[in-house]
Each structure stands twice: as structure tokens, then as C-alpha cells.
Amino acid sequence: MTGVRQTTPLDRVAGAHDAAVLAVARRGDPVSRAELADALQVTPQAISKIMGRLMGRGLIAEAGTLAAGPGKPTTLYRIVPSSRRAIGLHLTRSRVHGVVVDLSGEILERRELEIGRLQPVPELIETLATEARALAEVGPGVLLGAGVGMPGPVDWSEGVYRGTSDPDPWRGAEIRRLLLEELGLPVLLDHDSRAALVGETWSQPGLLHDAALVLVEDGLGASLCLDGSIVRGAHSHAGEAGHTVVRMGGAPCTCGRRGCAQAEYQAALAAGDDDLAAQVLATIVVDIVRLVDVDRVVLGGRTVYAHHESSMNAIRAALAEGLHAEPWVHVEVMLSTRGTDLIAVGAACEVLEHEYGIPQALVGPGS
Ligand SMILES: [Zn+2]
């Protein structure tokens, strides 16, 4: 494997086309070249080139023909889910939730391990490697690597967990490099909310063009997809909505400020005030909509599932109130389709995306 793939603008166009074809093909029924050309808004010649590339790599295969009137029957194509696999690991401070998925993003196997305590880094790497090795045994096809999604701050491009100002044994841990050395497989590391958004875009191909995913796990974060691209920012920190202030002089936050949404949300839940927690969530959702003009907001994460009804109601009410003067602004709010697998699946899908040529900070042996 090569290291971080050096992508040129042409690679990116090719990668985006390959990914778009696979995204269309993933939606279900076999597709024709004409349908693909239409979906991608490219010429039939361009589709032939893309299909040649994908078939040459075994990612797409013919799936029969469709006779429609006189003339040559139309050849149909489908993706070959069993051609590739990727592992996704969702790491929290107390748990590893792992999956292995096929090329369509379908889960072949999942594993869940309660760690129960904050492991020192060498032990943590061993734990992750053990889970990955067990998942690597499942399913056919080429295993492309392992993606890890974890709470931030995470430096995606460096593969490092940056850590917080609290005493934090994982602070500065080069998780990507260490796990790669342990596994001998390509590895990438990403922020949990970004991995979650990639996972969700795979579940809803083409729908999340301008969207935010608000993730509520132990912390509260968000990630953004604008103009069809995941936004990362200058320090891989884009979307830290949990650290925007919702109450001046409010509850102290781990980041050093007061009144951050995350701190206020956790304080409200700890006090048993679910309504207030839902209002905090609703406030940051409206702020995100105001700031970057998304038309879809996806809610995900274990904590939000436990409170999804109050959360959805509060968000819808806050959006209706906040946008009432602009009836042409429509924002759809939905729960993630992936449940508690979301982050693990997303981390695995990021590895698959690298194979398609979408820039991902996947680093392999020998790089
Ligand atoms: Zn904060």
C-alpha cells in the first residue's frame, strides 16, 4: 500500500466519479450505463471509461440485460459487494464497537467490547488490534484496512488524538501509526462525528449534499457536509458545535470556557431536566442552520437515542420559530438510519472511500 494518497485534481474527479457510480449502484437495482450517465450528468463515453475502470478492479460486474423494444438489449450493472471489505472501530473511553462491512457498506459482523476503564495507550492499541483481527476473519474480498472513529479532538491528517486539557493518558497518542504497526494493515483515524457523517452519507446516497450531523455520545459534536463535501477545517476541528457558548457564565466546560453547549447539555441531563437538554440541542441545531444553511440535520449517537423524542420535538419547534420569517427555508430533521453502528460503519466506509479515490488520510505499511 502507498501512504496518504497524493491526489491531483484529475484523480479527485475520477475518484468522485467512481464513488458516484458506486453510490448509484449501491441503491439497489442493477443500473444501465444510460441511467448512470443521467445520474452523474456526464457523457456515455465518460461512463464507459468509468465503468471500464471499476470493472477492471472487480468492483462492478454485469448483471444481465434488459430488453426494451427493438434493438440491442441494455446491459445492466451492479456492484460486487463481496469484492472488498473494511473494518470500522468506534472507540470511546469505555468501549470498542467494531464492524466489518462489504463494499456496499453492509455489516458482515459486529463486535462489542466493554473496556470499563481508561486503558494506557499500549494496552489500548492491543485491544483495538485484537478486535480488528477478529473482524478480519469474517467475509470474502480484499480487506482494505481499518478505520477508527473516536471523540475529538482528533487530527485526521496526522492520525493523532490531540486530547483535552484534563489529565488524559491518550493525549498526543499516535493511534494511527501505532495500530498500523500492530496490524500491518492500512489504518485511518477520524473524529467520531465526521466518521458518523460519512456513514450516514452512505446510507442516504445523494441526499446529504448540504447537511449537518449532530452527534450526542459522551460529548456533543457536529459535522458538516457542504456542497457535497465533508468539511474538516484547518485543524480537523470543524463542527465543534458542543463548544459554542449557549449561556454566558454558565457551567464550566472541559475546554476551559463556560456555558458551552456540551457542558450545559450534560448539566441538564445530570439534573434530570430532559427538556432543558433538548433545548440546548435545539439551540445549536438552529445556530448551525443559520451559520451554514444546511437543509438536512441528522441526529445520531447513543445519548440522543435515549432522548430522541424530546430532542426531535424541541429541534423542530426551535427551527419553526427561528425560521418563521423565511418560509422558503426548509430543513428536514431525522434520526440516523444506522443506530449505534453509525460511527463504526462510518469509519469503515471512510476506508472504502479511499479505495474509490476520495481523499482520506489512510496510511499503510511502508509509507
Ligand atoms: Zn467547551
Image: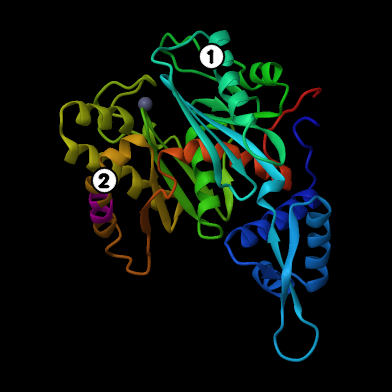
Instruction: Give the residue type at disc 1.
Output: Leu
Q: Is residue 86 above or below residue 204?
A: above
Mark 1 / mark 2, whichever is N-terminal: 1
Q: Quadrant of the N terminus?
A: top right
Q: Is residue 48 above or below residue 340?
A: below
Q: Residue at x 68, y 47 (%)?
A: 82
**Marker disc for residue 124:** 1
Q: Nearer the viewer, residue 26 or 295?
A: 26
Can you tell me whether the CB of the residue at mark 1 lies under 8 Å from the nearest atom of ligand 1? no
Considering the whole magenta stretch, tell me its main secondary structure. Answer: helix
Secondary structure type for disc 2: helix
112 part of magenta stretch: no
Residue 347 in sight in this render: yes
State how many labels appear. 2
**Residue to which mark 2 is pinned:** 311
- Residue 278 is situated, as x and y percent measured from the top left of the image, at 24, 42
Q: Are marks 1 and 2 in contact (CB under 8 Å)?
A: no
Residue 218, by quadrant, is top left
Question: Horizontally, is 82 left or right of 151 in the view?
Answer: right
**Marker disc for residue 133:** none
Q: Residue at x 18, y 37 (%)?
A: 274
- Residue 147 is situated, as x and y percent measured from the top left of the image, at 60, 32
- Residue 346 is situated, as x and y percent measured from the top left of the image, at 54, 40
Residue 151 in sight in this render: no
Region rendered in magenta: 313-318
Q: Nearer the viewer, residue 291 or 346?
A: 346
